[in-house]
Amino acid sequence: MATNITWHGNITHEERKVLAKQSGLTIWLTGLSGSGKSSIACLLEEHLLKRGYNSYRLDGDNIRFGLNSDLGFSDDDRNENIRRISYVSKLFNDSCTFIIVSFISPFKKERENARKIHEADNLPFIEAYVDAPLEVVEARDPKGLYKKARQGIIKEFTGISSPYEAPEDPEIHLKNYDSPIEKSVEQIVKYLEENNYIK
Ligand SMILES: Nc1ncnc2c1ncn2[C@@H]1O[C@H](COP(=O)(O)OS(=O)(=O)O)[C@@H](OP(=O)(O)O)[C@H]1O
Ligand SMILES: Nc1ncnc2c1ncn2[C@@H]1O[C@H](COP(=O)(O)OP(=O)(O)O)[C@@H](O)[C@H]1O
């Protein structure tokens, strides 16, 4: 509990943006395992870096090796995973970095909480739904996880034995199943340009 502790501030966020020559933002990719989150995040990160924007990726698989290595895949653990990462992405965003978050983040309530955590401090939060139907991701199955989930070897697997709540009104809806990854990246870039996040 947050008792007997004091928040220490330094320069204002407005001053930081001027010094950093860019503002921060969070692009929150959500979707089933195999929908294309990591591939899109990697290409997008590269694209933005090459255009001169300080950008960084937080990926579910990667974060679970370290910071969140104590968490599994029960509903409670997934919620804690997303809660922690919401605060981490807010910190990066506040530091004037473009942060690309790619977690399954299956539950609406936790994604909404992530949004609130950002928007409470006027930090832009852009939800991008990486949409690919279960039959498509199951056919892709690059890590063989769906096969194991169907065999009951992996329990509580998203889309099979654990729910995925698709966003109803995301800022960006990527239909990442009948066109190449590059198209999805272009769609995000277009959104960022049209909303004056990038020039
Ligand atoms: N039970 C179960 N359900 C879903 N996914 C599983 C599971 N077990 C392991 N994996 C692997 O973990 C990756 C998802 O981790 P996340 O942190 O993004 O999940 S979550 O947001 O907490 O739901 C996910 O990576 P992606 O395929 O990149 O989504 C899987 O490789
Ligand atoms: N638009 C697409 N068309 C065809 N294959 C794709 C597309 N997007 C992703 N893939 C493939 O699907 C697999 C899963 O992609 P990945 O980015 O690892 O998804 P996630 O991070 O959501 O699990 C990879 O083999 C990737 O090359």
Image (cartoon, grey):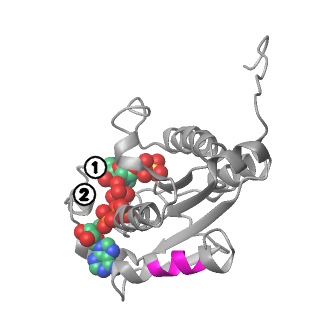
Q: Nearer the viewer, mark 2 or mark 1?
A: 2
Determine if the C-beta at disc 2 is less than 8 A from ligand 1.
Answer: yes
Please provide percent x and percent y for residue 188. Answer: 53, 75
Q: Are marks 2 and 1 in contact (CB under 8 Å)?
A: yes
Q: Is residue 17 above or below residue 190?
A: above
- The answer to whether one can see residue 15 in this image is yes
Determine if the C-beta at disc 1 is less than 8 A from ligand 1.
Answer: yes
Image quarter of the C terminus: bottom right
Q: Give the overall secondary structure of the magenta segment.
A: helix
Please provide percent x and percent y for residue 82. Answer: 55, 45
Q: Is residue 196 above or below residue 119?
A: below
Q: Secondary structure at mark 1?
A: loop
Residue 190 belongs to magenta span: yes
Q: Secondary structure at mark 2?
A: helix
Q: Nearer the viewer, residue 107 or 88?
A: 88
The amino acid marked with disc number 2 is Leu
The amino acid marked with disc number 1 is Ile
Image quarter of the N terminus: top right
Residue at the disc numbered 2: 145
- Tell me if 133 is positioned left or right of 100 in this view: left
Residue at the disc numbered 1: 154
Magenta stretch in the rendered image: 186-191
Write the residue at 51% across / 81% down: 187
Label 2 vs 1, first from the N-terminus: 2
Q: Nearer the viewer, residue 191 or 146?
A: 191
| Ligand 2 found in image quarter | bottom left
